[in-house]
Structures are given as C-alpha cells and as structure tokens.
Amino acid sequence: MEPALTLEDDNPDSHRRARVRAVLERRKLTDSVSAEQAAASWEQDRFVARARALFYARLMFLTLGLLILAVPRWSLYFGFQGTLAFAGYFTMLLYSVANYLVIDHPKAGRWVTYITLCLDLTIMVVLINKPQVGGGLQSPLLGTQLLFTTLFAILFPKPLAILPSMLTLPITARLDLLLEREVTAVEVLTLLWYSALNFIIIYVLVYLNEREAAAHREVVELQGDLKEIAVVEERNRLAREIHDGLGASLSSMIIQSEYLLGMAKDDALRSEIQELKSTAEESIEELRRNLQMMREDFEITQGLEDYVKTFHERTQLNIRFERSGLPQKLSPDAQLALFRILQESLSNAVKHATPQLVQVKLDYDQDRVHLSVNDDGKGFDPRQTPRGHYGLLNMRERAMKLGGTLIVDSAPGNGTRVSFSLPSSP
C-alpha cells in the first residue's frame, strides 16, 4: 500500500526549503549567509573542482611515467634506472594521493596543491633536461611546460603564483649552457615562441578568471538586492493591509466606546467602557508604531524618544532620556529589538519595581549601539525569575539573534539596570 501524501509533501515551499537546506549543508553555510560568504564558498567549490581535475591529469602522467620505467630504451634515454627511479615514482604517487585527500580543506588544500604542483614542475624540468642528446630546448617534452602554465593560471591566477612555471624556460636555457649543449638559432626561436605562448595563456586565463569572478559577485549582490526589495515590498503590503483592516477596526471600537460613554449613566459601567476605550487607544498607538518601524525611512532614535514621552504621559513616571553619538542606519530587526527591549524594560519597571526615576540612555559609537535602562526601584534577583514570566528570556533571545549582548544587573533593594548592545550592522 502506498503511503498517503500529506499537504506538506505537496507544498512547493517545503520542497524549496528542503532544497535550500541541502545546498547550505553541502556548502557548509548557515541560514544567515552573507554575500561575501556565498562568494567565498563558490570560489572554494571552483578550486576543489579544478584541483580534482589536476589529480586526474597526474594519474595520466603517472601512467606515462610507469611506461618510461617499464620500457628499457625509454628509461635509458632519460637515465631513470634502478631503485632511485622507482622511489621517485612512488613518492610522486604518494604526494598525489595525499593532495587529493586534503583538497576540500579551505587552507591546507590550496597550500598542498601548490607545493605538489611545484614538485610536478620540478620533475618535468628534470625530464626535459636529463638527456644529454635531444634534451633541454631540443626536448620533445618542452611543450609540457605550457600545460603547467595553464594549470598554475587556472588554480592560482596570481602573478607571483604563476612565476615558477614561467621560470622553467630560462632555467632550461641556462642548463643547456651549463651542460655544454650548443644553443642554435632555432632553439632561441623556440625559447621566444614558448615565452610568447606562456604570456598569451596567462593573459587569457587570468582575464577570463577575473571576469567570471566579477560576474558571479555581481549576480550574488543582485540576488541580495532582489531579496531586500521583495522583503520591503511584502512589508509595505502587510503594513497597508494591517492599517486598512485592524486599524479601521480599532478606530471603530474607539468611536463606539465614546458613543457608549455618552449614553451610560452608571459609574461602574462608565469606568469599564473608559478602560475599554483606553485599551483600544493604546492598541492603535502600538499598531502605528509597528507600522512606522516597518518603513525604510523610520528613525529609531526619534521613535525611542517619542515612546519615552508617551510612556511618561500615560504612567506619570519620571523618565529621563539621553542620547549621544552620531545616529546610524540600522536594519529593521535591530530597530525592532531596540524598541522591544526598551518597551519591556519600562513595562517591568512600572509593574514590579515602583521606581521614582528611570534613566534611558542611547549611545552610538563607531560600530555598536548601546541602550541602557536604569531604575531606582525595588530590584530583584535575576537568578530567580518567576515561572511564566518570559520578558527577560525574550530580550536575551532578541540580543542573541542579532549578535548582541544583554546584561541585567539587579539586586533586591538596589534597582535594576538593563544594558543592551549590538553591532551597527548585524
């Protein structure tokens, strides 16, 4: 019997989330990945793919090396005979396998690949220059140098990183002179020809690599911008819907409460209606603040100061608000966290501390924002939070989500100080 399909199995959003999770896990990224992290992950994946291609190319070279060792005339021509030649061959095999095993490591993979590629280049130089007759610039293997230039340019597209391959040609020419081989005009032309080809290969590959990387960075940044635009558009749509729906209902409740107040004669009933009206007014004020915070041009500093004034007018609590530093543009999540922590701190002070004075300070420094709420009330023991009170827990979760810190310093009889700090660009 086939299992029944659930609604979640048919939901496109569920499949999309599963696909996103699979990609993030494969790339070892988190849900809050930045554009820089995404670009670095792409570059690492690209390097790993190219390094694996290098390993398969080495397997081909190792096969050819085994043939050279197995055919007596070839091994005699290159001078590779005896135990030392086989030891060198198996050394190359071992470091090739070791390189393949550490390719995925972000740092070790690159260093080991570069070192082993230089070892391959050294072996190639030996193969070119070892034969006394037909070696050096006359060697038919000299064209292999172009392959190494290509590999260096693909894996490490930096001028200094490609230098070892470029030095192969002058080293070969110098060894010809040291080994007393006659350098003819044709060999000089060969040297110039291969040098020109090296520069062409390097220019083309480095240019294409830079264009590819720049195009990828542009696409990643564009995707981030499109995501932000979609979030802003959805936020504005929700703001309009909430304003037209819930805002209209609360306004209607306030109007009806005023109408009932004019009709009611009983004092107890009038008190209940007045409380209902006050609750509706506070709710619509809270709604307006939330809608303002959903706008891109919302100024959190002025918003916090306005809330402190409104809270003072409603509760008659003596509150002093101070701000310092140059205000900075914060993300909507950071603005909401600052507002909610101030709101929760003032609410707790009124409900539990009965203070005479509350001091609110907002400070901007170079890379962080600091909010402190200090009251001279009864205080409490932060280690003994009553069951069912989640205000402090919610504040800590907000701070943790944004990479900020929250410190609640209090003791019975010594008031309470809530300190919240978060990066300017969380």
Image (tube, rainbow, N blue to C red):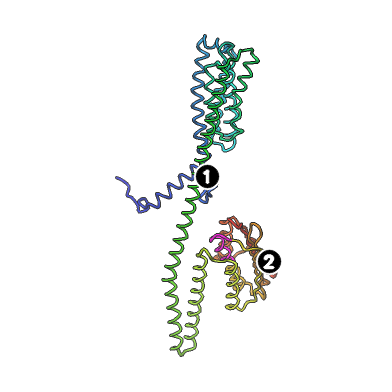
Snapshot quadrant of residue 99: top right
Q: Is residue 212 left or right of residue 385?
A: left
Figure quadrant of the N terminus: top left
Relative image position of residue 341 (x, y in whole percent): 58, 65
Secondary structure at badge 2 equals loop
Q: Name the residue under label 1.
A: 39
Snapshot quadrant of residue 329: bottom right
**Mark 2 nearby-residue class (10 Å; few <14, some 14–19, many ≥20):** some
Relative image position of residue 212 (x, y in whole percent): 49, 40
Secondary structure at badge 1 equals helix
In-front residue for pair 176/378: 176
Query: Is residue 115 among the parts visible in the rendering?
Result: yes
Relative image position of residue 398 (x, y in whole percent): 56, 60
Q: Which amino acid does label 2 sit on?
A: Ala
Query: Is residue 408 among the parts visible in the rendering?
Result: no
Figure quadrant of the C terminus: bottom right
The vertical placement of 345 against 76, above or below, is below
Which residue is painted at 56% across and 36% down in the image? 105
The vertical placement of 421 against 101, above or below, is below
Q: Residue 258: say if magenta.
A: no
Q: Is the magenta stretch mostly helix, strand or loop?
A: helix
| For discs 1 and 2, the disc positioned in front in the rendered view | 1
Relative image position of residue 224 (x, y in whole percent): 49, 52
Q: Are marks 1 and 2 in contact (CB under 8 Å)?
A: no
**Mark 1 nearby-residue class (10 Å; few <14, some 14–19, many ≥20):** some
In-front residue for pair 278/153: 153
Q: Name the residue under label 2.
A: 411
